[in-house]
Amino acid sequence: EMMSPSTEINFTARTVSLFLCLVSFCVFGEESPSPEYRYSYQVRLLGLPLGVKATVLRNERGNLVKIKSEVSHFLAINNHDSYFELDNCEYRFLRYWNAGKSLGYEFDDKIVIDYHLSKIRYQGFTKKRGSRERVPVDKEYDLDGAMYVDKLSQFEAMGCLLKGGKSQFELSYVDDSIGRYQFNLVESSQTQLGGNEYSIVHVVATPYEFLEGSVHTPVNYWLIEELGFIPLKIQTKLKGLVLTVELIDQAESD
C-alpha cells in the first residue's frame, strides 16, 4: 500500500489517502448470515474536521473475513478490499486490492499470499501528478514467519495478540516494499460510550524497518476491547500536522 512518490505534493496526497483508507473500511459479502456491525468515524486535521465521515461495516462468513473500504472526498478517492481468515484468533492474511486518486496522483495495486509456495506477490502501478505514464511494478517476496497485515486487517491481528496477553509485538505491512512495525501497549483505561462503559487499550506503533522515502510514520491507536478492538481513536502526523480519526457512532444490525 505504500509507494514512494518523488515530489512533496505526491507524498502528502498519498499519505492523506492512506490514512483515510486506514480508518474508513467496511466488510462486504454477497451472503451475510452473521450480524453486521456498523461504525462511523470522522477525520480531523489539527483538531478541525475535514468533512470526511467513514462508515465501518463488519461481518464474516465462516472463517473468511472480507473488508471493503470506500473513500470519496475532494482530498482522496480510495477503494480497498482486504481478505483474511480468522478462526479462534488463528489469523491468516490472504490478499488485498487497493486503488485510488489524490491531487493528481493515481495508484492501483494488489498482493496475494501463496502459503503453498511461501511467496508474496505484489503487482501494481503508480502515476505521478502531471504525468501520463503509469509506472508498473511486479515484485515477489519470500514468505517469512512475520505476521502480515494491511490497514484493514490490522485491528483483528492486534486484538488477538492483545487478548493473548502480548504487551509488545510486531506486525509487517507489504506492498512495493515491506514495512515492519513494533507495537507497545501503553496503558488500559475505561470510557463511557452511549451510556455503556468500555475498556480502552492504548497501543503505539513505531516503524523500525522500511524503505527510505516510503510512507511509514508512528501511529497511536486507542482500541475498544468489548467491540473487537475496533478503534475509538487513531492519531498520527501528516507532514508534522496532527491527524486524528474518532469514532462518532456504532450500531448492530441483522
Image (cartoon, grey):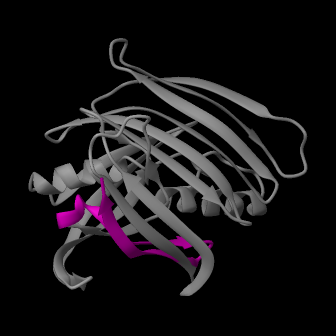
Q: Is residue 146 left or right of residue 47?
A: left
**Residue 13, quarter of the rendered image:** bottom right
**Residue 18 higher or lower than 124, as above or below:** below
**Residue 65 higher or lower than 162, as above or below:** above
- Which residue lies at the image location 54% right of the left edge and 74% below the top edge? 43
**Magenta run includes residue 228:** yes
Residue 253 x %, y %: 32, 58
Q: Choose between 107 and 218: the one closer to the eye.
A: 107
**Residue 188 higher or lower than 92, as above or below:** below
SS assignment for the magenta stretch, majority = strand
Range of residues picked out in magenta:
226-254
- Which residue lies at the image location 13% right of the left edge and 40% below the top edge? 88
Q: Is residue 170 left or right of residue 18?
A: left
**Magenta run includes residue 64:** no
Q: Is residue 116 left or right of residue 2?
A: left
Q: Is residue 143 left or right of residue 42?
A: left
Residue 85 x %, y %: 29, 33
* Residue at the front extreme of this rendering: 254
